[in-house]
Amino acid sequence: MTYTVPKLKDFSANALRKATDDARFAFKDEDREVSSEAEWKLFRDRWLARKNGILTQINEMWLKAAPKEAKREVGQRVNELKQFIDGEFARNHDWVVAADKLASGLQPVDITLPGIQRPIGAEHPIIKTMNDMVAVFRNLGYSVEEGPVIETDYYNFESLNFPPNHPARDMQDTLFIANQESKPLRERLLLRTHTSPVQIRTMEKMKPPLRIVIPGKVHRNDPPDASHSPMFHQIEGLAVDTNITFGDLKGTLDHAMKAFFGSSVKTSFRPSFFPFTEPSAEMLVSCFICGGSGLRGSQGCRTCKLSGWIEILGCGMVDPNVFEFVKHNGYDPRKVSGFAFGMGPDRIALLKYGVDDLQLFFQNDVRFLRQFA
Ligand code: DAH
């Protein structure tokens, strides 16, 4: 039965509800019958046409005919109905068109056209540098460990042989978490300034022998410039066993640098200081841009500042004082020894890709990042 708009005599709330419900049900019944776009168009015009469409008739026959005191209520009801029907038409049109195309034997999609490209993204150059470096150590049998970026004073400093108030703490411009003063010093929270605290965390949970690398984010109160950022990355390494010597440190790091930068690079060590290693060293690699000559053609090499060498990491033999903090888990400094190292993948990525401003890595400009994809 096709729907025709009834005349209303009764304008009570109940009668109005019934009248609009009837219209709604009729609409739904007719909607279900539609099976082609042509039918859909007829259906739409039947309900929406300005001239004599059902909604127009309802407007004329109900709203205009309503006694003054019922006009408000009728207006509201009719409006709701209209909104419902408009919404239904907006919703079902695409389906009807697609179904119609299918029914008429036309493909709704032309499968010979190239698909919509969904860019899958690529590794960020720093993450890639970290992954490549970590892979070198994984091939040597190292496993990967991680630790929290929000760290306690104990792990970041004390257990790494930075005593309270020791000036060595000033080497690292620490960002402290606010309102920690009521806690004992060792429990106060800060943003870790290096990945070294994960050395202790790992030795607390794993007995020796141990060979680990620790990639991660660190923070320091350094204003951003071309070579500094308050957030940057480190890769830490730690090997502990019986009879680990400085020779193992040199051999391991020399191999790692050759695997990473190419077999022709040379390494060089010079003395340095870190509270958690003794002795401590800085390691340099021969410049992989100019081959260590300090020259590019007749010009000086900018990458190594004409020196032929690039400082790449800090390292050393684990200080026995550090082992004292994890002695209970098998790290008796009289029985085990180890070496550790820490490097900055951000700087390595700058050098490797010839980028002259560290900030570019952190500004998330896809025009820059896309070049590494
Ligand atoms: N944690 C040091 C820093 O951030 C880097 C470092 C130096 C790590 C020597 C080590 C190491 O493990 O042995 O400046």
Image: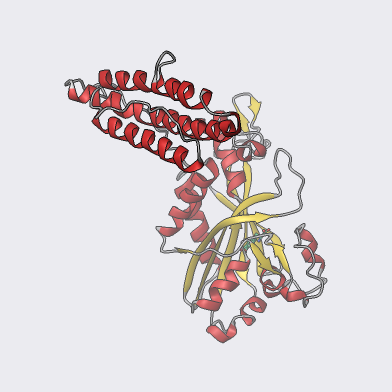
Residue 69: percent from left, percent from top: 60, 33
Residue 203 appears in the rendering: yes
In this rendering, is residue 321 above or below 313?
below
- Horizontal placement of 136 versus 71: left or right? left
Task: Give the residue drawn at x 44%, y 34%.
Answer: 84
Q: Quadrant of residue 112?
A: top left
Q: Residue 87 appears at what percent x and percent y? A: 44, 31
Q: Nearer the viewer, residue 178 or 293?
A: 178
Q: What is the residue that sits farthest to the bottom in this orientation?
A: 328
In this rendered view, identify the residue nearer to me: 19 or 97: 19
Q: Position of residue 110 (x, y in %)?
A: 25, 22
Q: Residue at x 39, y 19 (%)?
A: 53
- Colour scheme in the image? secondary structure
User: Outermost residue toward the top?
Assistant: 51
Asked whether residue 289 is in view, the answer is: no
To which quarter of the image does residue 1 belong? top left
Q: How many marks?
A: 0
Residue 172: x and y in percent read: 75, 59
Give the quadrant of residue 220.
bottom right
Left or right: residue 210 versus residue 99 is: right
Name the outermost residue toward the front.
Answer: 9
Q: Quadrant of ligand 1?
A: bottom right
Is 293 on the left-hand or right-hand side of 260? Answer: right
Taking the image as shown, residue 310 lies to the left or right of residue 170, namely: left
Look at 77% across and 75% down and name the residue there.
185
| In front of the other: 166 or 49 | 49
